[in-house]
Image (spheres, rainbow, N blue to C red):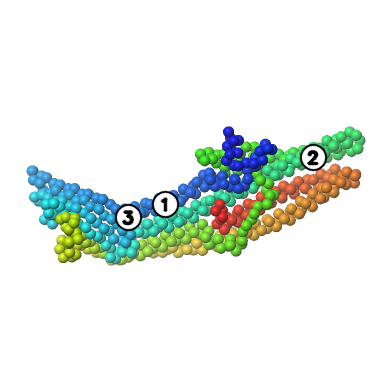
């Protein structure tokens, strides 16, 4: 079942050979779709959405009702009932509608209403503090900024996952190719040892050549075992990036192998474009959103320096259909105003100064972060281009060593060379081939690191 599961999910190929190749593209698709960190990145956006929903709750209409009654020694002192609806608005105006029924022998005269009750419809308006911005509107705007910040954070998390998973894959691919090369080296050494031993028995080679050939077999077996250990570790590390749709970890079958690390991969990039991407880097955007949120807080704190001046006005009618007949500020209304202001404003000025200091602190932090991101990108571009040059140089080196080995083999076959020289040429070639694999993996990992430094990744 595990084998079938892997075949279906990864789209593995080469079944005729009894093996399955896990391609780099399929691997990345799987990581992006099911890795817990990728799911955490998607959940990060939900944080912002829920924060925005909670802040919008400050503008939800509110129903209320009050009831109070007093009876003592068979006397009905009062019976007060009030119900209404309050609707906050984005303009800072609070709309109100209410109905009250009051009665009782000792009811406060100002609370007396007609027998069928009294209805009111009006509004409360802040004319100074709270006119342009208040706590609810500030919280809503900050929540909207936070939504964008979580989107940038999601991109950064996915970019880091892309880089780490890419590095793991190509390290695994290089270690796999190294094992194959060293397996071939062991096979060659064993065949040569049997040949030398047979030649010794026939008197063509001295006994010391059999010792030379045997030590080469042992040395190569040791190197192969070391490479197998490294490949096993790389496979286990790669498994940490593979999960299924049920949030269960997936382990690769031993028959699954990677792409050839030496295969060409399209590196489509432009240095100038990459440098422009840096200004939209997720880390920089998150800092920008922090500053924007602080700017909203600064505007709110500045507004707190104004005095409180709140005006309330209500139409009063006995029947709801009488509202349109009621003249404004002539009859049947209730009006009021509230004014207050601290004399020294020390608390308000202190809070405003603290917010301004935070903005300055974050601004310097942004400048430093931009510089670090720019330098990191330049370093990664230089590193990628240098490794690419090294790979070209070392490819020529391997080709040269292959020619030297073929030439040495030809000389050995005609008796003009020795087994020691052939082994030396072969060891040099095997070492160079494994180094070439490591360089190829390093180049592909360097490309992913360069994309990450520019703020790119899965969504490049």
Q: Which-is-in-front pick, marks 2 and 1? A: 1
Q: Is 316 or 375 nearer to us in this picture?
A: 316
Q: Is residue 197 above or below residue 167?
A: above
Q: Which-is-in-front pick, marks 3 and 2? A: 3
- Which mark sits nearer the N-terminus, 3 or 1? 1
Q: Which residue is mark 3?
A: 59
- Residue 246 appears at what percent x and percent y? 51, 39
In this view of the protein, can residue 123 be seen by the observer? yes
- Residue 50 appears at what percent x and percent y? 40, 50
Give the residue at x 57% y 57%.
453
Q: Residues within 10 Å of mark 3 (few under 14, many from 20)?
A: some
Relative placement, left or right, of 119 versus 220 is left
Q: Is 36 or 283 nearer to us in this picture?
A: 36
Q: Is 260 or 162 nearer to us in this picture?
A: 260
- Using the numbered discs, state the Cα–Cα distance from disc 3 to disc 1 in whole angstroms: 16 Å
In this view of the protein, can residue 345 be seen by the observer? no
Give the residue at x 19% y 64%.
328
Q: Is 225 or 440 nearer to us in this picture?
A: 440
- Residue 335 appears at what percent x and percent y? 19, 62
- Which mark sits nearer the N-terminus, 2 or 1? 1
Q: Residue furthest right?
A: 203
Give the residue at x 70% y 44%.
177
Circle number at residue 189: 2
- Using the numbered discs, state the Cα–Cα distance from disc 2 to disc 1 in whole angstroms: 64 Å
Q: Which residue is mark 1?
A: 49
**Residue contact between numbered discs 2 and 1, judged by CB atoms under 8 Å:** no
Relative placement, left or right, of 47 versus 101 is right
**Residue contact between numbered discs 3 and 1, judged by CB atoms under 8 Å:** no
Q: Residues within 10 Å of mark 1 (few under 14, many from 20)?
A: some
Q: Which element type, helix, strand or loop, lies under badge 3?
A: helix
- Using the numbered discs, state the Cα–Cα distance from disc 3 to disc 2 in whole angstroms: 81 Å
Q: Which element type, helix, strand or loop, lies under badge 2?
A: helix
């Amino acid at each position: 079942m595990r084998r079938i599961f892997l075949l279906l999910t990864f789209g593995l190929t080469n079944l005729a050979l009894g093996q399955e190749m896990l391609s780099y593209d399929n691997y990345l698709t799987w990581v992006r779709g099911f890795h817990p960190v990728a799911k955490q990145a998607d959940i990060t956006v939900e944080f912002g959405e829920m924060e925005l929903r909670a802040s919008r709750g400050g503008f939800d209409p509110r129903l209320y009702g009050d009831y109070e009654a007093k009876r003592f020694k068979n006397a009905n002192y009062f019976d007060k009932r009030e119900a209404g609806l309050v609707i906050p608005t984005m303009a800072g105006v609070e709309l109100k509608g209410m109905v009250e029924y009051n009665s009782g022998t000792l009811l406060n005269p100002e609370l007396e209403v007609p027998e069928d009750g009294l209805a009111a419809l009006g509004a409360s308006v802040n004319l100074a503090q709270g006119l342009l911005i208040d706590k609810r509107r500030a919280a809503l705007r900050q929540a909207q900024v936070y939504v964008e910040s979580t989107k940038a954070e999601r991109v950064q998390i996915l970019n880091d996952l892309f880089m780490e998973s890419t590095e793991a894959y190509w390290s695994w691919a290089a270690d796999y190719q190294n094992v194959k090369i060293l397996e071939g080296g062991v096979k060659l050494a064993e065949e040569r040892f049997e040949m030398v031993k047979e030649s010794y028995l026939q008197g063509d080679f001295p006994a010391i050549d059999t010792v030379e050939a045997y030590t080469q077999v042992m040395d190569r077996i040791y190197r192969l075992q070391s490479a197998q250990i490294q490949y096993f570790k790389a496979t286990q590390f790669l498994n940490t990036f593979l999960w299924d749709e049920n949030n269960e970890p997936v382990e690769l079958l031993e028959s699954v192998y990677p792409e050839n690390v030496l295969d060409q991969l399209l590196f489509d990039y432009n240095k100038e474009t990459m440098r422009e991407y840096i200004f939209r880097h997720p880390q920089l955007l998150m800092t920008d959103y922090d500053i924007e949120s602080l700017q909203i807080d600064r505007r709110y704190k500045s507004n707190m320096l104004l005095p409180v001046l709140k005006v309330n006005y209500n139409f009063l009618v006995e029947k709801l259909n009488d509202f349109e007949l009621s003249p404004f500020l002539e009859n049947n209304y209730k009006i009021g105003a509230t004014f207050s202001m601290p004399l020294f404003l020390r608390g308000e000025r202190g809070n405003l100064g603290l917010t301004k200091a935070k903005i300055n602190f974050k601004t310097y932090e942004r400048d430093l972060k931009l510089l670090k991101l720019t330098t990191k990108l330049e370093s990664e571009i230089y590193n990628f281009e240098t490794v690419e040059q090294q790979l070209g140089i070392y490819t020529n080196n391997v080709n040269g060593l292959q020619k030297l080995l073929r030439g040495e083999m030809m000389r050995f076959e005609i008796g003009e060379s020795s087994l020691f020289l052939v082994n030396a040429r072969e060891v040099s070639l095997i070492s160079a081939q494994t180094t070439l694999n490591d360089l190829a993996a390093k180049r592909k990992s360097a490309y992913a690191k360069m994309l990450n430094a520019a703020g790119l990744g899965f969504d490049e």
